[in-house]
Amino acid sequence: MGDTITHIGRSILQHGPENDRVYVMKLCEGDTERVLSAIGGLLDTYHYSKVFVKVRASLAGDFVRDGYGQEAEIPRLYGGEETCLFVSKFLTEERSLNADRWETVQVLSAAQAKKGVGEPVFLPDGYVCREAGAADAEEMAALYRAVFDSYPFPIHDPRYIADTMESHVAYWGAWREGVLAALSSSEMDKAGANAEMTDFATRPAYRGQGLALYLLQAMEADMALRGIKTVYTIARAVSYGMNITFAKQGYVYGGTLVQNTHISGSIENMNVWCKHIT
């Protein structure tokens, strides 16, 4: 069973046993006191080991005073002007330990060595790239189930995919001979003029052809047309491929979220990368 999404005022929280955390996905002005109270109630009830908050810099003070520490930041995320901070509180010593620190450093070093400015790449012969629609949801969910043993959001469910398409997510795919080979998405905060570039998955038989980089470029072009100013990702810190992909495309490293997300079967460190596109 996946983690639960709940609303506190206009703010959005996710919590549950799989990620063993509370994640404040969106914090709106005026909701801070109620959100902190809700977090306290969830911790009393479920004893989660981490709280992770995505917050405007101007609203972060109450969390810092409550013992939260900064793990990452994205400059000019909101409206192309205000910085976003990722602040966290660890409730157990075990959760705070960066067990994958050495591998995370190695991956970051490899990614920075490949850093580029987003030179155009081309789709290999025989592929078709396009934005996915509701009719593709079953095939998309099947791909995600095949690639990820676990994931922090229910992308294995075609109903979830179709619902998010209707509201705030643009999915892009690459097909070869009618088979969905690779997939990704742009999760938009339209009011904040930003988008998370996420949900990258490529079938093993189609890897090594630069499909993720091509999809990333296609999504950036799409987001720019929609008025998005800043894009970012939260990538698995031990994934050479994804960190190198974002570094090649000119993204800037913003920090590492320690023991943050249950993905591919276990809780892992995640790296934040960001870029301003308009």
Image (cartoon, rainbow, N blue to C red):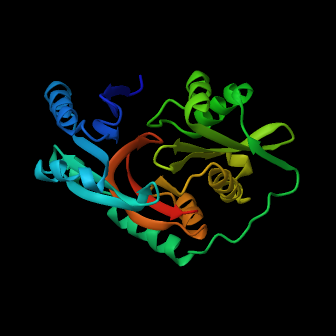
**Which of the pair 153/228 is nearer the observer?**
228
Residue 159 sits above or below residue 22 on the image: above
Q: Locate residue 103, reporting x and y percent.
A: 40, 64
Question: Is residue 18 rendered to the left or right of residue 161?
Answer: left
Residue 106: quarter of image: bottom left
Residue for point 38% across, 28% down:
3
Tag count in the figure? 0
Question: Is residue 93 rendered to the left or right of residue 30?
Answer: left
Residue for point 50% across, 29% down:
154
Residue 277 sits above or below residue 164 on the image: below
**Which of the pair 191/89 is nearer the observer?**
191
**Which of the pair 260/163 is nearer the observer?**
163
Residue for point 30% across, 28% down:
9
Q: Locate residue 16, reporting x and y percent.
A: 32, 29
Residue for point 56% across, 52% down:
228
Residue 24: quarter of image: top left
Which quarter of the rendered picture does the N terminus lie within? top left
Residue 210: quarter of image: bottom right
Question: Is residue 66 rendered to the left or right of residue 12?
Answer: left
Is residue 110 in view from this perspective? Answer: yes
Which quarter of the rendered picture does the C terminus lie within? bottom right
Is residue 47 in view from this perspective? Answer: no
Q: Locate residue 259, reporting x and y percent.
A: 31, 49
